[in-house]
Amino acid sequence: MALIFRVLDGRRHLGLIAASEGYRRLKAAQRQRDGIAATHLLIETTRPARIVAYCQLSIAQLYLHQWREKDRARLSVHPVPVLRIDRIAVARPEKGKGHGRLLLGHAVNVALSLRGPLGVRAVIVDAHSASLAAFYGSFGFHPVANEATTRYLPMGFNDSRLVPD
Ligand SMILES: CC(C)(COP(=O)(O)OP(=O)(O)OC[C@H]1O[C@@H](n2cnc3c(N)ncnc32)[C@H](O)[C@@H]1OP(=O)(O)O)[C@@H](O)C(=O)NCCC(=O)NCCS
């Protein structure tokens, strides 16, 4: 099956995404409605009305003391712009097929594309359970200091499985 990413167009598709698995979080819907985050849908080219998975992305910032010392070596001023994954979800029947990894890779590509234009230097996400912390940790995300659930993946992440050999 051929898959593509499509950025959700304003309020137009909110009904569609609200019906998809895992999109019950009011905040995520509000961010989309208010236009302060972008929802990226993973869809099949032959069945565009069916959402396989999605991630919601926005811009955030991290203070230098929240980074590991080795990651802030070339940074001297804060706060530092970062790409935030507000929400990531894979439709129930589609779990375990690599779509979560694909979404993370997509978020990393978006972050890399914003490094030049906006100075984005990391991807952050909230891992609300030990299982999700393990999921993100397996891709090279590290805990953010003083934030119990937040994890970050610094740019230049040669140790991440999201970067091809
Ligand atoms: C977490 C989630 C995004 C993973 O998506 P997925 O498509 O099932 O994951 P993938 O098939 O891409 O798995 C990639 C790797 O992560 C591992 N993994 C998947 N889910 C995991 C979990 N919950 N905990 C730890 N590891 C996990 C897989 O074993 C796989 O490892 P491998 O590369 O060594 O084979 C998905 O289960 C989901 O939508 N969960 C519900 C929504 C949610 O909790 N979102 C997070 C809030 S932001």
Image (cartoon, helix red, strand yellow):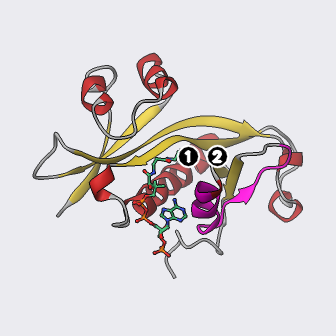
User: Mark 1 packing: few (<14 Cα in 10 Å), some, or many (20+)?
Assistant: some
Residue 39 part of the magenta segment? no
Look at the numbered discs 1 and 2 and tell me whether their residues touch, using CB distance below 8 Å: yes
Q: Amino acid at mark 1?
A: Leu
Upstream in sequence: badge 1 or badge 2: 1
- Taking the spot 84% from the left edge, 49% from the top edge, the residue there is 145
Q: Against 22, is 116 above or below?
A: below
- Taking the spot 71% from the left edge, 46% from the top edge, the residue there is 149
Q: Amino acid at mark 2?
A: Val
- Residue 118, image quadrant: top right
Residue range in magenta is 131-146
Task: Locate residue 43, reporting x and y percent.
Answer: 24, 49
Left or right? Give the position of 91 relative to 76.
left
- Taking the spot 40% from the left edge, 36% from the top edge, the residue there is 39
Q: Which residue is mark 1?
A: 114
- Taking the spot 10% from the left edge, 52% from the top edge, the residue there is 46
Quadrant of image for the N terminus: bottom left
Q: Which residue is mark 2?
A: 120
